[in-house]
Amino acid sequence: MSEVADAPVDRSATTYVAGHRGLVGSAIWRRLEREGFSDLRGRTSQELDLRDRDRVFEYFRATRPRYVVLAAARVGGILANASRPVEFLSDNLRIQTNVMDAALEAGVERLLFLGSSCIYPRLAPQPIREDALLTGPLEPTNEAYALAKIAGIGQVQATRRQYGLRWISAMPTNIYGPGDNFSPTGSHVLPALIRRYWEARESGASEVVNWGTGSPRREFLHADDLADACLHLLDSYDDDAHINVGTGVDATIKEIAALVSDVVGFEGTTRWDETRPDGTPRKVMDVSRLTALGWTPSIPLREGLESTVRWFEDNPSRALARG
């Protein structure tokens, strides 16, 4: 089947965003609202535990969505992934399988499954092309999460082949933005750095200590850019293969930390604890297939960081709630 979809999705159709309160899901919800989607549906994890198969099926039978964006997942940084692999594997497998199985029963026409760039081998050639999947060992610190996401890609492909439904998968790079998880133990690197430097500034500390050597290279995409890309894919992409979503530009963690320190306004020094793990040496996406579809990001990293830090400072009770 061609990569290009036949027509844009119907803005009046019932559209369910799984994980609509999370960093990615909330950004997608806002983007769809701005676009004029008039029948958006969402449930919090308290209202609908996506690990509960019976309740998920009940919800889909009652709602009968035409489109689904599957942005719900258990997520976390190196420490959370490495220390709780069972939860990262089991929870994500159940969330994905339940939503997709229920969507299949309900005849959902378009489903967008969101995975992660961690699906690729630890030492994949850079920038990472989509065909690098399953060509080498995964990064051990997030292997469980990666395996779950790889299974999700497989289920989307199997559904397309067996039932002919126009479901697709997208693999975003590292996402950040307002509403992120800033927990010092459960967050990803960028929000963790924001909180660390902010707390150091507030306490008057003279030094911040970061994990690793600072040499790994990472790519970051603002959640609002990802949301815009997701809408573009729903409108224009229809292919069996998953597609990368990112900027195609990376920087060292040391460079990122220096930028965060500057944006936050921390005036002390930074020390690197080289006894701590670095994770994957480099991870930057090849986004040529997405670019060929006519989409590119629009939010520069510094601008995105400034908006994220503003949100953090304006919402301290929410930002620090998962400490």
Image: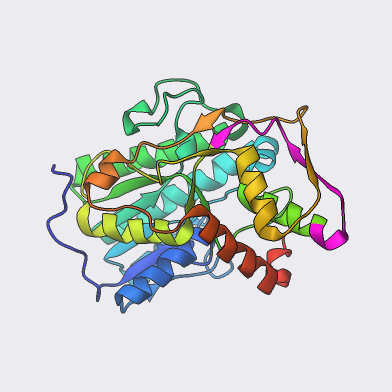
Q: Which residue is drawn at 66% across and 45% down?
A: 257
Q: Which residue is drawn at 18% across and 63% down?
A: 8
Q: Is residue 61 above or below residue 229?
A: below
Which x, y percent locates residue 279? Answer: 62, 31
Q: In this view, does 243 lie above or below 184?
A: above
| Magenta residue span | 201-217
Residue 139 in view here = yes
Q: Residue at x 51, y 53 (%)?
A: 301
Front-lying residue, 208 or 110: 208
Front-lying residue, 305 or 82: 305
Name which quarter of the figure residue 33 lies in.
Answer: bottom left
List the single residue furthest toward the top. Answer: 136
Q: Residue at x 72, y 56 (%)?
A: 195
Q: Is residue 47 above or below residue 204?
A: below
Q: How many labels does the image show?
A: 0
Front-lying residue, 180 or 135: 180
